[in-house]
Amino acid sequence: MMVNASGRASGQKAHLLLPTLKENDTHCIDFHYSFPGTLNVYIKVDGGPQGNPIWNASAPVTEGWVKAELAISTFWPNSYQ
């Protein structure tokens, strides 16, 4: 999936939501990004409010795509998104 931010005004946001994770396990989330701008990754626990970012990147224009890999540990009975 790709979110194209070309031609967007500063301050606009795009949201991509993963399916809810419920297993008592560690999940690998990997993605590629290219920007100028800021990219934040958040986790919501049990459908609650969005907390602070667990990962972020901010940079001027990148050359090509940059890969990011995150390990997210989930603990039953909570659900994570």
Image (tube, rainbow, N blue to C red):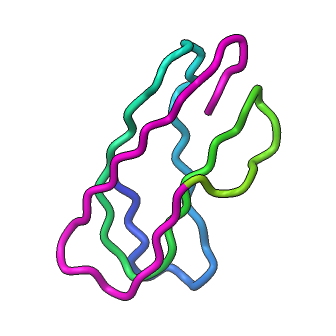
Q: Position of residue 66 (x, y in %)?
A: 25, 65
Q: Is residue 75 visible?
A: yes
Q: Is residue 45 above or below residue 12?
A: above
Q: Which picture quadrant has residue 36?
A: bottom left
Residue at the (40%, 59%) spot, across then down:
3
Q: Specify start and end residues of the magenta stretch as a single range.
A: 55-81
Left or right side of 48 for 64: left
Work out which residue is located at the far bottom of the displayed protein and give it: 60
Q: Which picture quadrant has residue 62?
A: bottom left
How many numbered marks does the figure carry? 0
Q: Is residue 1 visible?
A: no
Q: Position of residue 68 (x, y in %)?
A: 33, 54
Q: Position of residue 15 (x, y in %)?
A: 57, 53
Left or right side of 11 for 39: left
Q: Is residue 57 above or below residue 22?
A: below
Q: Position of residue 25 (x, y in %)?
A: 49, 18
Q: Nearer the viewer, residue 47 or 56?
A: 56
Q: Nearer the viewer, residue 56 or 47?
A: 56
Residue at the (77%, 30%) spot, across then down:
47
Q: Is residue 77 above or below residue 79?
A: above
Left or right side of 28 for 72: right
Residue at the (41%, 44%) spot, across then down:
70
**Which quadrant is home to the C terminus?**
top right
Work out which residue is located at the far left of the displayed protein and give it: 64
Residue 9 lies in the magenta stretch: no
Residue at the (43%, 38%) spot, across then down:
71
